[in-house]
């Protein structure tokens, strides 16, 4: 028993000696475990809102139309003996398109010339007779009535010459009309008649159609309510008018590409379509490569006014809440994020126009929405548009109707 007690007492003393060592080894781990974790602030990209002068652009539906259209018709009767053009090619005014058999017109011209020579001979005879009678009348050898009759015959022969000259001119004109020429410059379409066809004078038969495509028109429509809103904005001073001839007009093709050449606004009709409530406008565009063809559907972008203190933010900066309202996240001076309701206008060049809810100098979040919630403190960095850096158009670039 005494030996067992001695061993127990020794084990207790050994544990007592190791206790400080074990406590020293455990103490750093407890200190590390008890230290609070370091949480970094999420990084977001922002822009600083500025008020600046911007053109108000509307994008409207339209169709391409030729500037001039001419239906080719014959002015004389006859048989077509030749078609002198290639279908679908460009022609100049005066180029020969068709030839009608000229022989009947040549014979008519020869006959008119012969009649003219006959009238000239009759005039010479009447002129000599009048001169002779006039001399005899001075000598009182003939009566005054005979003298007047001779002068009248001379004038009648003179009038006959004028009539025959007109017949010659008409015959020459009909011979010239036997060659059917292009009335305007443009692209000639399909040949609607062939050689051997009989044409009648004053017939409405269309031989071909020529369309002038450079420059070319774009006809587009805008609702009368939009035009009234625009007029009221001018009257209240919210927008400035663009000087006549200074408004830029651009075309967006049906595949979404922007037509490279700008145009000019020609006119706006002074009437409203009773069925659609739309007003028709027309723009003119250069078309040297014939890229624009009549009947093409296009979207016309037209500058209609100047907003002198417009506020715009990138499209992705505007979020929609559960009720469908527009809102943005604004970084305050203390670094915390707050939700701010806004009212948006139109989308232009990839940016929302903000009509209410923002003022110059506020910092709006553009990227990093998934990193924070409203009220969190964030680290703000300046946003850079990757598309602009690469020289590309902004994503979703288009102009839409104003939203409430």
Image: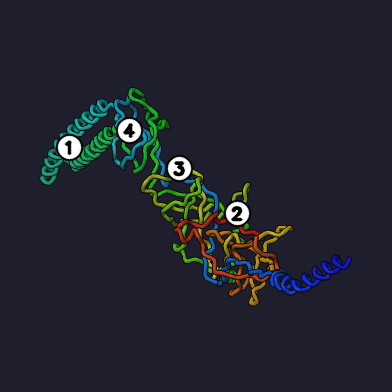
- Kindly identify which numbered label has been placed on residue 123: 1
- How far apart are the alpha carbons under marks 1 and 4? 51 Å
Per the image, the residue denoted by label 3 is 294
Image vertical order of residue 197 relative to residue 402, above or below = above
Is there a contact, CB below 8 Å, between mark 1 and mark 2?
no
- How far apart are the alpha carbons under marks 3 and 2? 23 Å
- In terms of depth relative to the viewer, which is nearer, 56 or 235? 56
At x 51% / y 57%, what residue is drawn? Answer: 394
**Which quarter of the picture shows residue 31?**
bottom right
At x 58% / y 55%, what residue is drawn? Answer: 400
Q: Measured from the top left, where is residue 326 in percent x and y?
A: 67, 62
Per the image, the residue denoted by label 4 is 86
Q: Residue furthest bottom?
A: 333
- How far apart are the alpha carbons under marks 1 and 2? 72 Å
Image vertical order of residue 32 relative to residue 251, above or below = below
Q: Residue furthest front?
A: 2
Per the image, the residue denoted by label 2 is 223
- How far apart are the alpha carbons under marks 1 and 3? 59 Å
Labels 4 and 2: the sequence-earlier one: 4
Labels 3 and 4: the sequence-earlier one: 4
**Which quarter of the picture shows residue 194?**
top left
Drawn side of residue 77 relative to residue 297, left or right: left
């Amino acid at each position: 028993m005494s030996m067992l007690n001695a061993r127990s007492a020794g084990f207790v003393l050994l544990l007592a000696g190791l206790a400080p060592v074990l406590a020293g080894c455990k103490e750093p781990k407890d200190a590390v475990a008890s230290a609070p974790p370091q949480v970094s602030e999420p990084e977001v990209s922002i822009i600083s809102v500025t008020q600046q002068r911007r053109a108000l652009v509307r994008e409207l539906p339209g169709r391409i139309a030729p500037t001039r259209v001419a239906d080719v018709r014959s002015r004389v009767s006859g048989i077509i003996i030749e078609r002198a053009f290639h279908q679908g090619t460009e022609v100049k005014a005066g180029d020969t398109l068709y030839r009608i058999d000229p022989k009947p017109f040549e014979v008519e011209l020869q006959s008119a010339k012969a009649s003219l020579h006959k009238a000239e001979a009759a005039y010479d005879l009447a002129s000599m007779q009048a001169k002779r009678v006039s001399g005899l009348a001075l000598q009182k050898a003939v009566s005054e009535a005979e003298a007047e009759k001779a002068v009248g015959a001379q004038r009648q022969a003179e009038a006959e010459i004028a009539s025959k000259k007109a017949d010659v001119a008409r015959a020459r004109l009909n011979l010239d009309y036997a060659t059917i020429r292009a009335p305007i410059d443009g692209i000639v379409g399909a040949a609607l008649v062939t050689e051997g066809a009989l044409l009648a004078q004053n017939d409405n038969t269309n031989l071909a159609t020529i369309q002038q495509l450079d420059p070319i028109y774009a006809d587009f429509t805008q609702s009368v309510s939009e035009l009234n809103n625009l007029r009221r904005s001018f009257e209240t001073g919210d927008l400035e008018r663009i000087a006549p001839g200074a408004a830029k007009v651009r075309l967006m093709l049906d595949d979404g590409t922007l037509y490279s050449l700008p145009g000019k606004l020609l006119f706006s009709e002074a009437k409203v379509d009773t069925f659609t409530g739309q007003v028709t406008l027309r723009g003119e565009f250069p078309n040297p490569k014939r890229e624009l063809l009549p009947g093409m559907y296009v979207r016309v972008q037209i500058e209609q006014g100047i907003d002198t203190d417009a506020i715009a933010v990138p499209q992705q900066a505007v979020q929609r809440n559960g009720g469908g309202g527009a809102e943005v996240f604004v970084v305050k001076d203390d670094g915390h994020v707050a939700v701010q309701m806004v009212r948006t206008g139109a989308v232009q060049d990839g940016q929302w126009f903000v009509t209410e809810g923002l003022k110059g100098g506020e910092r709006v979040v553009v990227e990093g929405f998934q990193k924070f919630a409203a009220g969190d403190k964030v680290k703000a960095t300046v946003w850079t548009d990757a598309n602009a850096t690469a020289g590309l158009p902004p994503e979703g670039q288009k102009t839409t109707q104003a939203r409430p």
